[in-house]
Amino acid sequence: MPREESQTVLDVVTYVQRHLDASLAYRFACRVGMCGSCAMTVNGQSRWTCRTHVSRVADDGRLEIAPLHNLPVVRDLVTDMTEFFDKWAKARGRFTGTRSRHEDFERVPPAGRREEVDAGIECIGCGVCYSACDVVSWNPDYAGPAALNRAWTLVQDVRDAATIERLRAVAGDAGAHACHTHMSCTERCPKQISPTAGIAGLKRAIAMAALKGEL
Amino acid sequence: MSARTQTFLWIGQRASAAVLALCVLVHLCTIIYAVRGGLSAAEILGRTRGNAAWLGFYSVFVFAVAVHVPIGLRSILAEWFGWQDESRDLVLWVLAAVLAMMGIRAVFGVFG
């Protein structure tokens, strides 16, 4: 494998597919860290490959590239993301507004709760956190960091009208309460999001709702 | 089990952990203080017999253990052994009752 300056792991995979084994299956789209489709494990750690330089991760000049953990493999480096995104839906990761298109825009104060939303909103759905999570590997029903982070951004969204239903959806053994705060998701997230902080926020919000009799 | 019940289990485990942290601290400090001049059953019983404060303290300790241990084991049994059905919760209810009964028996044993 020829080494080049600023070579990324995705460049390496592409070289293999184009020059060494045309049958290699892998997934990518934007190549600039926006689409979240090129995540793989590199030397055992989950990463986005398009923004990971070989020079930073090569162990003694060697790379071991494999599909993401905790997801079924379709072929080679391609995983089936169905359950990952199904869990977003199950965690009610869809915005539920109250206004119609005929009404004026809602004015959202940029301080306070909106800051919590901004901290978690840039998720690109790459699945790196899900692959890195120990709890997902132990408990396949667990919603996982990305779905819970999404739920947290909606719980903190002042415009959303489905907070209690959402808290109910993410409470308990398959939801926020299963998190052991290992923080692998936070350590590995390529967008520097902390799903752990969001999950802790969900635990607090769910506990308050339960104590108030709203859950 | 409903999301609400699971949430109250989580609250119960956190709350009992807070109580246990305090109880273990008091218990350890008492041990370190009490064994300075050697340890004897008579000395322990002399401190605990008829003492309502120690009775109350260790009753709270036992109650916190009976709440905390089964809820913690519930997660361990699910994650390590995949035991997640209702039979697990039934066994853990029994365990909680056994821990509470044995603990209270011991507490009254040194009180009476």
Image (spheres, coloured by chain):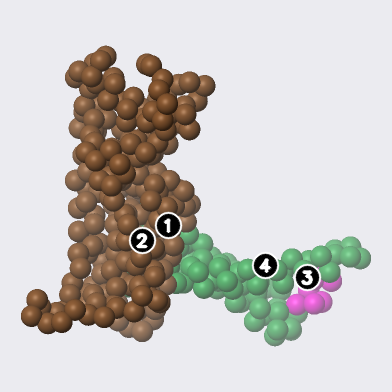
Chain colours: A brown, B green
- Residue at coordinates 51% horizontally, 62% vertically from top-left? B69
To which chain does the residue with label 2 belong?
A: A
Judging by the rendered image, the residue that carries numbered circle 2 is A120
Q: CA distance from mark 1 to mark 2?
A: 7 Å
Q: Does residue A191 appear to the left or right of A98 in the view shown?
A: right
- Residue at coordinates 25% horizontally, 15% vertically from top-left? A19
Q: CA distance from mark 2 to mark 4?
A: 38 Å
- Marks 2/4 in contact by CB < 8 Å: the verdict is no
Judging by the rendered image, the residue that carries numbered circle 4 is B24
Magenta-drawn segment? B41-48
At which x and y percent is residue A135?
A: 39, 49
- Marks 4/1 in contact by CB < 8 Å: the verdict is no
Pick whichever, A161 or B78, lies toward us: A161
Q: Does residue B18 appear to the left or right of B53 in the view shown?
A: left
Identity of the amino acid at label 1?
Ser
Which element type, helix, strand or loop, lies under badge 4? helix
- Marks 1/2 in contact by CB < 8 Å: the verdict is yes
Which element type, helix, strand or loop, lies under badge 2? helix
Callout count: 4
- Marks 2/3 in contact by CB < 8 Å: the verdict is no
Q: Say if labels 2 and 4 share a chain.
A: no
Q: Does residue A132 appear to the left or right of A141 in the view shown?
A: right
Which element type, helix, strand or loop, lies under badge 3? helix
Pick whichever, B104 or A115, lies toward us: A115
